[in-house]
Image (tube, rainbow, N blue to C red):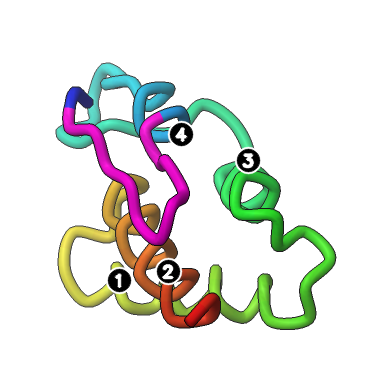
């Protein structure tokens, strides 16, 4: 993943850059707990809507590729809305 993505002053590249291709998978995967990483990175670990934003991002991603990079994308968009 070489696209540098910053949304609402949060640089999502550290999470995206950890994603790797795994044998048998056509899309990159985050090596660990993606939910924990996203909530921590956005500073939403103890935010009452953090978990809800993550679950909504997963549901949105499920409509298309349902891959980790897409979950990061939708989560970043939702966090942007939450912070405005």
Give the percent coordinates (x, y) of residue 33. 63, 40
Give the percent coordinates (x, y) of residue 8. 40, 61
Q: Which residue is mark 3?
A: 33
Q: Which residue is mark 2?
A: 58
What is the crowding at mark 1: few (fewer than 14 residues within 10 Å), some, or many (at least 20)? few
- Distance from label 1 to label 3 (Cα)? 18 Å
| Sequence-first disc among 4 and 2 | 4
Please identify the quarter of the rendering in which residue 53 is found. bottom right
Judged by depth in the image, the label closer to the viewer, 4 or 1, is 4
- Look at the image and say whether residue 10 sits in the magenta stretch: yes
Please identify the quarter of the rendering in which residue 80 is found. bottom left
What is the crowding at mark 4: few (fewer than 14 residues within 10 Å), some, or many (at least 20)? some
Which contiguous range is marked in magenta? 3-13
Task: Give the residue at x 22% y 26%.
Answer: 1
Task: Give the residue at x 15% y 33%.
Answer: 26
Q: Is residue 52 above or below residue 46?
A: below
């Amino acid at each position: 993943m070489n696209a540098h993505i910053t949304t609402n002053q949060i640089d999502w590249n550290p999470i995206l850059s950890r994603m790797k291709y795994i044998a048998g998978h056509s899309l990159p995967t985050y090596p660990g707990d993606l939910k924990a990483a996203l909530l921590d990175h956005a500073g939403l670990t103890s935010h009452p809507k953090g978990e809800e934003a993550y679950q909504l991002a997963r549901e949105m991603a499920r409509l298309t590729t349902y891959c980790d990079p897409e979950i990061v994308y939708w989560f970043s968009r939702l966090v942007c809305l939450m912070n405005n």
